[in-house]
Image (cartoon, rainbow, N blue to C red):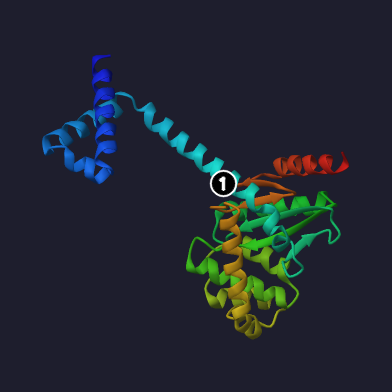
Amino acid sequence: MKYLKKTLLLSAFSLGMIASAGSPAQAQDAFTDAQQDAITSLFEQHLEENPQLVIQAIENYQSREQEMQARAFEDNLEKVKAQLTSDDVPFAGNPEGTITMVEFFDYNCGYCKRAMDDVIKVIENEKDVKIFFKELPILSASSREAAQFALAAHKQGKYFEYHTALMNHKGSKSTAVLKSIGEDLGLDGEQLEKDSKSDAIEATLNKNRDLSRELGIRGTPAFIIGNQLSPGYLPYPQLKTVIQGVRDAQDG
């Protein structure tokens, strides 16, 4: 208890110095080297004796991040919703589906690959759902090139076939491999490569990035089902539950 009181007093003193100095940098200058060393030592000792504080701090940080994400999503969804489901966005499922599901993904994302089977189950079993696909290549340069090739396949009318093949592909995603995947599906490989480098596809990817930022999406996969954001991997049973919730709200 004595140690805790000392720590709290020191913390209060530190905060008081920050307030009076006007900035953390100025407050730091207000301490002697010995005082700063003492503060650091007390802080380290306190963490060693109370390791749960680290977990608590992480949980608090994650909670704040989730709150910020939810707030950004709620504030901006209506403003950008038309861009999520516009006619030029690749889709699968029922073209006349009354429930929309948007997936943001990266072709190098392990959980996105894992989600592919679950997405197919939605297509097969949820006949009133239309799924829109938004490439969000954030993991590597090869993620971006893969997204470019997928959108190029869309220009030849075989987006979902190419998307599925690429999600199921194991190994490198070099230009030659990406071209070969398309040719195996009956696409024109030369045209595929040419279109992948187009300004229009580059603009689409930049637009997807901007949309994800406006909606507070910071990782992949992320699903928007109806008006609900579900970040992270969701197996089919959970996707089905969210979809049913949207369905019930529509019916009600």
Residue 114: give x, y in percent of width and height: 62, 51
Residue 144: give x, y in percent of width and height: 54, 69
The quadrant in which residue 134 appears is bottom right
Left or right, 22 with respect to 96, comes to: left
Left or right, 53 with respect to 32, comes to: right
Image quarter of the N terminus = top left
The quadrant in which residue 177 appears is bottom right
Q: Nearer the viewer, residue 32 or 148?
A: 32
Q: Nearer the viewer, residue 110 or 210?
A: 210
The quadrant in which residue 136 appears is bottom right
Residue 40: give x, y in percent of width and height: 21, 34
Q: Determine whether 50 is above or below 248 in the image.
A: above
Image quarter of the C terminus = top right
Determine which residue is flagged by label 1.
69
Identify the element where label 1 is drawn.
Answer: helix
Residue depicted at x 21% and y 32%: 39
Q: Determine whether 32 is above or below 144 in the image.
A: above
Residue depicted at x 24% and y 46%: 25
Res. 172 visible in picture: no
Res. 31 visible in picture: yes
Q: Amino acid at mark 1?
A: Gln
Residue depicted at x 71% and y 73%: 154
Residue depicted at x 54% and y 77%: 175
Q: Determine whether 42 is above or below 115 in the image.
A: above
Left or right, 222 with respect to 237, comes to: left
